[in-house]
Amino acid sequence: MLQCIAVDDEPLALELLEDNISKVPFLKLVAKCSDAMEAMKVLQTQSVDLIFLDIQMPGLTGLQFIQSLAKKPMIIFITAYEKYALQGFNLDVSDYLVKPVSFDRFVKACNKAWDLFELKNKAATEVSAASAPSAPEYFFVNVDYSLVKINFGDIAWIEGLKDYVKIHLKTGNRPVVTRISMKSVEEQLPTTRFLRIHKSYIVAVEQITAIRKNSVFIKDLELPVGDSYRESVIGLTGKPS
């Protein structure tokens, strides 16, 4: 939905513009203004995507108005004068309509503004996604007075032992033993890659080679599945429990 305002010093022209705007489903008229100064006040309080703007108005003309704006919404000029077209396009307006404007020409200008709006939004989304920091692929645990980095991709399964956990690695090296609760470990692991299968076991989903009703296999290793976790485990298979 495009938030728009209509600016024209002629009451009949403003009424016609309001009527045309009401027929376009992606337009929402948030204000009607009889001069540029009134429009300026609206821009200070409202979010506006598009301005339908007359040029020849008392006080500040439409051309002077948009030149005064630091942050410009999209502009569609609707005027009785063709002679300002070049100036208008030099100001990067979306379209320039000469009165009287047929409804189909009005809709064409609105569609052009909508396409430009979507294009800008898509570009902004892509820039935002590209600049967003990616989630870390590791966490740190305390081991013998040091902080040891554990890569998520290196973990095969995790075993809870009261106040300690053993982090078993895919490499088959000695497990990393750290004083931490299973709950704290679980909160640091990405839920798309790890699954709690028992109050004492968390497994890397990619390491699971087989599933039974009461157990999970990582190659030849069989780990028990707790009653409260069975539904989540069976859910991995895509089959009803």
Image: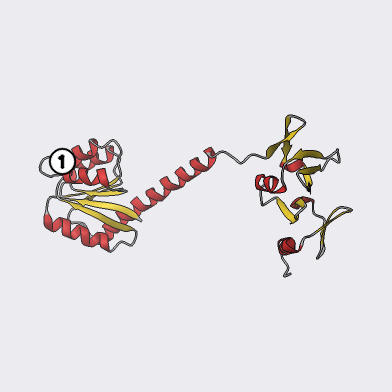
Residue for point 61% across, 41% down = 135
Picture quarter containing residue 101?
bottom left
User: Can residue 237 be seen in the rendering of this structure?
Assistant: no
32 vs 168: above or below: below
Looking at the image, the residue that sits furthest to the bottom is 240
Percent x, y of residue 88 = 24, 41
Picture quarter containing residue 133?
top right
Q: Is residue 114 left or right of residue 21?
A: right
Percent x, y of residue 110 = 31, 54
Residue for point 27% across, 37% down = 90
Q: Amino acid at mark 1?
A: Thr
Looking at the image, the residue that sits furthest to the right is 220
Would you call the spot at circle 1 few (<14 residues within 10 Å), some (14-19), or many (20 or more)?
A: some
Residue for point 80% across, 38% down = 176
Nearest the eye: 129 or 228: 228
Q: Which element type, helix, strand or loop, lies under badge 1?
A: loop
211 vs 127: above or below: below
Quarter holding the N terminus is bottom left
Picture quarter containing residue 106?
bottom left
Q: Which color scheme did the rendering employ for the protein?
A: secondary structure
142 vs 118: above or below: above
